[in-house]
Image (cartoon, rainbow, N blue to C red):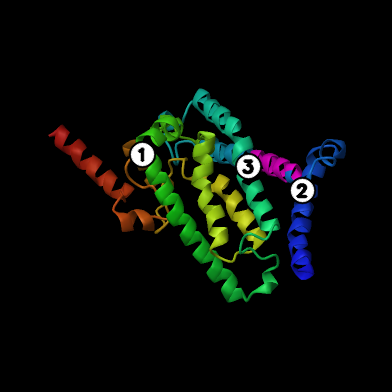
Amino acid sequence: MAVDAAYLMQFVDETSFYNRIVLSHLLPSTLWDPLPHFLQTWLRNYLAGTLLYFISGFLWCFYIYYLKLNVYLPKDAIPTRKAMLLQIYVAMKAMPWYTLLPTVSEYMIESGWTKCYSRVGEVSWILYFVSIATYLVLVEFGIYWMHRELHDIKPLYKYLHATHHIYNKQNTLSPFAGLAFHPLDGILQAVPHVVALFIVPIHFTTHLGLLFMEAIWTANIHDCIHANIWPVMAAGYHTIHHNTYKHNYGHYTIWMDWMFGSLRDPLLEEVDNNKDSSNKAE
């Protein structure tokens, strides 16, 4: 039992280390040092998540709307400043709740309830990468069905997911829309990351990194720029989802939509639109 307790302390020590790195650079120690460990972890996740959201959003918007103006998107497809500010407002209201989820997951890991391990050297490199792949497949499956049910179960859509779907056209979608959800909606779609911890052995820091990668990925798939890289669920697929409400529920890849019959390809969509335009012209 003493060995188990000593092993679990490795997680606590690692979490405390991350807390000190972030909080000591952003806040005076008198504000965060007296707080309990759980609240320090939540504050670290909140500040880090907020910084990640703004830095990734502003850099991506600067690149596609300024440096590459008319390269990826025509000027009339750029969302208004008002639309982006509204998205930021919705995301910031939800951020304290979003960041509660990784805080709870870290508490469960520190308590020894999950299959997380502390050091990469505890397993072989083959097992490390196989476990990451398995973890991501489970997460992809879970997010697909969670997202799909948020559409199919009408009360869930009406009271939760509809908040995100007010952005349903190219000129209203922006990288800042990536986290513009009702707080409970955003948490539900991230829950598969936590559930997978109880099923697959995963490296602790890798889990945290993948969870925070969500912020960058969701910004990417809301920029309306289609990178045709199979089998990635690029923004072209997700823009169709915002237009039709019943296709392309997947997160990182198109596999789940392909398997469960909800895939709609943006390139085929473009061909169909061109045919329709030609028929109308005739």
Q: How far apart are marks 2 and 3 (CA)?
A: 14 Å
Q: Mark 1 points at which residue?
A: 153
Dot 1: within a 10 Å radius of its alpha carbon, few (fewer than 14), some, or many (20 or more) residues? few
Q: Where does residue 226 sit, x and y in percent of width and height? A: 41, 47
Secondary structure of the residue carrying tag 1 is loop
Q: Which residue is drawn at 33% across and 47% down?
A: 266
Please, is residue 145 above or below residue 27 in the view?
Answer: below
Q: Which amino acid does label 2 sit on?
A: Asn
Please, is residue 253 above or below residue 31 in the view?
Answer: below
Q: Which of 2 and 17 is in front in this view?
A: 2
The mark nearer the N terminus, 3 or 1, is: 3
The mark nearer the N terminus, 2 or 3, is: 2
Q: Where does residue 170 sit, x and y in percent of width and height? A: 40, 34
> Relative to 216, is 106 on the left or the right?
right
Count of numbered marks: 3
Q: Distance between the residues labelled 1 and 2?
A: 39 Å
Q: Residue at x 55, y 68 (%)?
A: 131
Q: Name the residue under label 2.
A: 19
Q: Where does residue 258 sit, x and y in percent of width and height? A: 32, 56
The residues colored magenta run: 39-52
Which image quarter holds the N terminus?
bottom right
Which numbered tag is attached to residue 99? 3
Q: Distance between the residues labelled 3 and 1?
A: 25 Å
Q: Is the C-beta separation of discs 2 and 3 under 8 Å?
A: no
Instruction: Tell me the mark number nearer the camera, choosing from 3 and 1.
Output: 1
Q: Which residue is drawn at 40% across and 58% down?
A: 231
Q: Where does residue 254 sit, x and y in percent of width and height? A: 38, 55
Q: Is the C-beta separation of discs 3 and 1 under 8 Å?
A: no
